[in-house]
Amino acid sequence: MNLRTAEEGKEYIIRQIETDDEELDAFLFSLGCYSGEPITVISHLKGGCVVSIKDGRYNIDNQLAEAIIV
């Protein structure tokens, strides 16, 4: 399941990041978004979703939400 289909308010563990873009991988890693880390979907928006990673909240678009497998 990816973050786009994840339930709001429930904590998930990131299993993998499905992207071929090394810059995007590095960016997500800098946010603390990598395999084994907990992530929570705060809310779903029209163009993406708001997630909580570690102590931060981030708004990510649908394409990125689909690349994060939980």
Image (tube, rainbow, N blue to C red):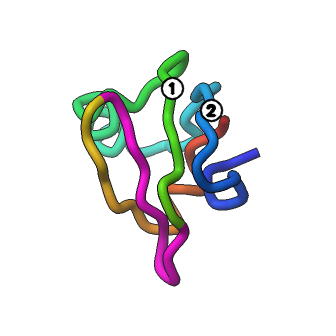
Residue 21 belongs to magenta span: no
**Residue 51 placement, left or right of 6:** left
Q: Residue at x 33, y 38 (%)?
A: 28
| Left or right, 66 with reference to 42 | right
Magenta span: helix, strand or loop, mainly? strand
Does label 2 or label 1 sit earlier along the sequence? Answer: 2
Q: Label 1 amino acid?
A: Pro
Q: Secondary structure at mark 1?
A: strand
All told, the count of numbered labels is 2
Give SS at disc 2: strand
Q: Position of residue 55 (x, y in %)?
A: 26, 32
Q: Is residue 61 above or below residue 51?
A: below
Q: Mark 2 = which residue?
A: 12
- The residue lying toward the viewer, choosing from 37 and 22, is 37
Quadrant of the rendering where the N terminus is positioned:
top right
| Residue name at image x 56 percent, y 43 percent | 68
- The answer to whether residue 15 is above or below residue 17 is above
Residue drawn at (49%, 43%) of the image: 20
Q: Nearer the viewer, residue 20 or 14?
A: 14
Q: Are marks 2 and 1 in contact (CB under 8 Å)?
A: yes
Q: Position of residue 8 (x, y in %)?
A: 61, 55
- Alpha-carbon span between mark 2 and mark 1: 6 Å
Q: Which residue is mark 1?
A: 38
Q: Mark 2 is on which residue type?
A: Tyr
